[in-house]
Image (cartoon, helix red, strand yellow):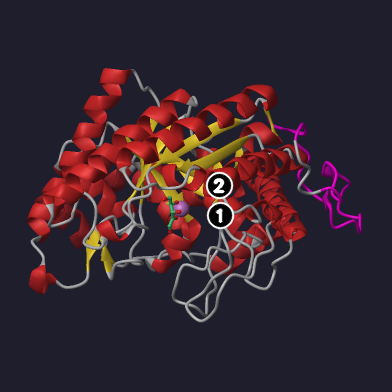
Amino acid sequence: MKDYFPDISTITYEGNNSKNPYSFKYYKADKKIGSKTMHEHLKFALAYWHTLTGKGVDPFGADTMIRPWDNLADPMDKARARVDASFELMQKLGIRYFCLHDRDIAPEAATLKETNRNLDILVELIGKQMKATGIKLLWGTANMFLNSRYLHGAATSCNADVFAYAGAQVKKAMEITKELGGANYVFWGGREGYETLLNTDMDFELDNQARLLRMAIDYAKEIGFTGQFLIEPKPKEPTKHQYDFDVASVMVFLRKYGLDKDFKINIESNHATLAGHTFQHELCLARINNMLGSIDANQGDPLLGWDTDQYPTDVYNATLAMYEVLKNGGLHSGGINFDAKPRRASFEPSDLFLCFIAGMDTYAKGLEAAYKLLNNGELEDFIRERYSSYSSGIGKDIVEGKAGLKELEEYALQHDRIINNSGRQELLETIVNRYIL
Ligand code: XUL
Ligand code: CO
């Protein structure tokens, strides 16, 4: 097997005094945080698309990325080389999971039949590498947004032939996910949305989106795929209005169609901020509804209004994210997928290592801070105290359903000189800082 990163050896933990850029400063895979090791808490995954097929293009310029595995002319040879490069990268970084779209691993051919044949060849190769290395598939998905046939959407296309093609693609993507032992299957509604309501029957399109998901649930039963289904919300991009806008809209959609027991949510940091939420908000809302399934870890740029998919380096954000994950009792079948790409000007192969190291260290530090914060209970104690008026008296009666509006009036007439306490936001932010710094 060719060595694509000959100058870089296995990345090890050297601690935060090390000046070696090719070392972990905080991520120590086997370090125990509570009852689990760091790698069990964090379950990092490599996103095959950005890492192996991302080229650094933007609307103003062509490829910038130097990727030695892309030098081959034949698309299948290139696909095979990418498998070798990805497993070398994961092994050297100690990343134990990866995520893929069907089209990331094998090129699309002239017919669907040939495309599926290409996929089978690559799946066999990937399966062998997984067996040899112990690296696992966190989730699989179908890319139903790149090809121009999906210009009106996939399940929400106005064209029934496109719906059928999308169904065939999901069927095959589920089969390969099962074959590779994938723990989850993701639906990100790539072009499931609209540009203008002047030409769109939103009601019908949403019914159709639900129809495809129902078919996937039925097919999973048929083939014995027991992985978790996940929906990944995003508010905009590529369409002006994506149907799976955010956690709240996904939950409403799933409940309307009776699909909520079959799905959890894969929450991406940059998608949360595009929706006008913090990442923590989205994680918390999913968690309290028992819908938090997995994470796409990245970050946006506060000055840019699009999905920049940067590697996460914001420790504050990672700490609050891990706080929610810990409160959720972990991510269960999910993990932390780096849905992120190097900046266009970070084009050398070695940048890939530096990117992953940055992201892994950020989440490791976030995990440590969040664990201590939760364990010491400073925020939890404050919040408990803040709502203590509901533990006795009229508050208890409200919670227990013993008071109606008449009782409330009776009480308020006697207690209309209200005393409030400070919310202490700045103090609490200082407490969070204390655990991070
Ligand atoms: C796009 C995005 C996707 C999904 C998988 O913004 O996040 O890569 O994660 O289709
Ligand atoms: Co994503």
Image position of 384 (left or right of 401)? right
Look at 48% across and 43% down and name the residue there.
106
Q: Quadrant of the C terminus?
A: bottom right
- The amino acid type found where label 1 is placed reads Thr
* The quarter of the displayed image where residue 397 is located: top left
> Circle 2 — which element?
helix
Residue 377 in picture, x, y percent from top left: 60, 43
Image position of 257 (left or right of 66)? left
Q: Label for residue 48?
A: 2
Looking at this view, is 397 or 436 the one in front?
436
Look at 60% across and 36% down and name the residue there.
97
Residue range corresponding to the magenta coloring: 6-34
* The quarter of the displayed image where residue 237 is located: bottom left
Looking at this view, is 376 or 133 the one in front?
133
Asked whether residue 124 is in view, the answer is yes
Image position of 284 (left or right of 145)? right
Looking at this view, is 206 or 281 the one in front?
206
Q: Earlier in the sequence, mark 2 or mark 1?
A: 2
- The amino acid type found where label 2 is placed reads Tyr
Residue 73 in picture, x, y percent from top left: 59, 54
Image position of 277 (left or right of 435)? left
| Residue at mark 1 | 53
Look at 34% across and 66% down and name the residue there.
238
Q: Quadrant of the N terminus?
A: top right
Q: Are marks 2 and 1 in contact (CB under 8 Å)?
A: yes
